[in-house]
Image (tube, rainbow, N blue to C red):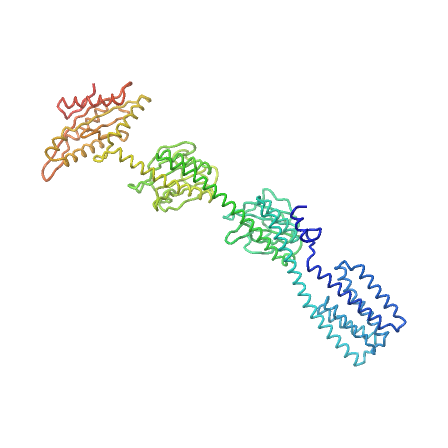
Amino acid sequence: MSNFESKWNKRAGVGGLWKPASAYTLNRRRFHHMVFIFRALLWLVVALFSLRNPANALVWISWGAVLLVGWLVWRRPSWMEVLNQFFIVTDLILISLAVRMSGGLASQAYLLYTGEALFLTAYGTLRYSLAGGIAVTVAYGLATGAWDAKLFWWRVVIMGIYLLASGGLGREYRMTRAKIRENDNKLEQLSHLRVLQDSIVQEQDIHVVLSRLLEESRGMIHADVAYIIRLDPNRRVTGLVMQGLATPKDIDLSSGPVPSHFRIVGAGEVEEWQWPLHQLLQSAGMKTLALVPLSYEESFYGWMGLAVTTGEDGFLTQEFIIQALADVTSTQLRFQESQEVAAKRGQLLAILERVGRIVNRNLDMDQLLQGLRQAVSEVLEIDSFFVALTLPEDPEHCLMQYLWDDGEEYPPEVLPLEPQGLTGSVITTGNPLLLNGQQQFGMLTGSQKEPRGMLVVPLMHEGRVLGAISAQSYRIEYDPDHLEFLSAIASQASIAIRNAQMYQQTQEIALTDYLTGLGNSRRFNIVMQTAVEVALETGQELALLLIDSDSLKSINDRFGHRAGDLHLQRVSQVIREHIREDDIACRYAGDEFVVLLPKSGLEDAVQVGERIRREIETIRFHWGDSVIIGSTISVGAAEFHAGMTADALFQAADHAMYLAKQNGKNRVAKAQ
């Protein structure tokens, strides 16, 4: 016996779980005893009326028999109730004998007939009172033989009124007693539910809790089978718990009859029995179902079903307790949901703290986004991950800053920003997307696979969309909890991404010449060292141009430094127009420019320098109203050889540039 059963039995004071010694049971027992005692007194009076008649021994023997039978069934209220009703006929016979023995119509024993009014009040109805009145009339008429006497009929009318009044009062009394019994049963059941709640409140396993609730539901409602269908917030079936029948495996639980209120399904409602689970119940002999939703406030958790092999009457009188059981079940599901939400929030906070440590310690964009992807992969099952950033100067394109797809990383890429596309719509509207199933999501650069589940979340910073972050899977589908998690990550990451962007901008400013927009000497030293290391490792060619203006000093002297600045800007513009995308141009100092040419030899460098020189020689620019200024440059070209250092390469180009100066300027000279 479980602790719960022992506790309930102790409260009930009996050995069985469903045999509580209720107040109603005790009152009912006393009532039947009282009726029997009054009957014994009535028969004693009958015996006294027949004392002078020699046949009175029969009455005394009957009275003694009544006492003996009463003593035998005294402790059995249900037997006593049947006995009291059966003796009503015996009462009429004995009273009629007493009337006959004590003078017939002249006897006052007829008053004992009115004693039947007491018993009709206890056990009869108006219909029974009418039948009792007829029975009394016949019995009194047979006992007196005075059918033609007015006194006889006056007495019959008076006794009939008594009997009918007793029947009416009895009807009201029984209705009140039935209501008391119903309320008493409800109180007992509610008390049982309270004990049940106390016993399961500490249970952590919701499946165990639901199984126990179903077991007790079957006992309280006298149901043959009970089940609970659990649904998620999207009303998709997440589980089945059943008692009274083996839980079916691999049964289709989708598209079930989700009830919005308590309802009873009878055998005649064919459509409701077409659901596979209900078909299984029907095949097991079930004829009636009670369905009740499990809800708490605005949340809907599923429904409870109770099945019996009988008709609907039992469920009709049990709606109150069925609803109470459903409320207890809903409360338990709500409690479990709250625990899960709290645990999920705690887990999310821990993850966000870890993500915060990862992203906030990295100002380098590449390292930041790699760490972000690793943090997301600890919670989400991802096969692809990307971060796309907006380009403020080009709203029609976005920068795929980071793309990890099927285990490989891909370089940044500028892509068209299509508002009707998935990423474009998220960036444009600022609304996240959750997409699942075999849909045309589009394919990323890389594996060229179509994802099965896709999350796209905007990166928001101070009300502005910085871009979007996306997690995708080729194997599973995502749910709203995954979207909530990625949104929380995105809100944390957007701050770090903005900080990294500002750091990049600061670095860019620190490495850029303010006048020409080219790299400055610091940037040149960084990229020069990197280019030399790459050339040493790969054996690729590398060349360097050192460009010096022949005209800056004279322009400054004749027209001022503002004209000299314009001259330097024109030189830098020509250099940009005549080099490749991979080539790097910097303003080294004053009127000196350097151009680093990866994968180019000396002859290639000379050709580039010559094109730049010719272009500058031919251009003119206006200064003031009528002055036209022209200029020239001297260029030194050198190439990298094995064993050289970055400084040696620069010195070679510098010597070549001075050689061009010495040979008359406005020319390109090769390093010797």
Q: Quadrant of residue 74?
A: bottom right
Question: Residue 226: x, y in percent?
Answer: 62, 49
Find residue 89 and report its horizontal and vertical position in percent. Answer: 79, 67
In depth, the one of 420 and 487 nearer the eye is: 487
Relative horizontal placement of residue 640, taking residue 630 as reference (left or right): right
168 shown above or below 79: below
The count of marks equals 0
**Horizontal side, residue 352 vs residue 628: left or right:** right
Left/right of residue 605 with respect to residue 296 in the rendered view: left
Considering only vertical position in the picture, is 131 above or below 24? below
Please state if 70 lies on the left or on the right of 409 as rendered: right
Rendering coords of residue 32 (x, y %)? 74, 63
The vertical placement of 472 against 17, above or below, is above
- Split into 4 quadrants, where in the image is the C terminus? top left
Locate residue 136: give its quadrant: bottom right
Q: Residue furthest right?
A: 54
Give the x, y percent position of residue 65: 84, 63
Return the residue nearer the eye: 168 or 449. Answer: 168
Q: Residue at x 29, y 36 (%)?
A: 506
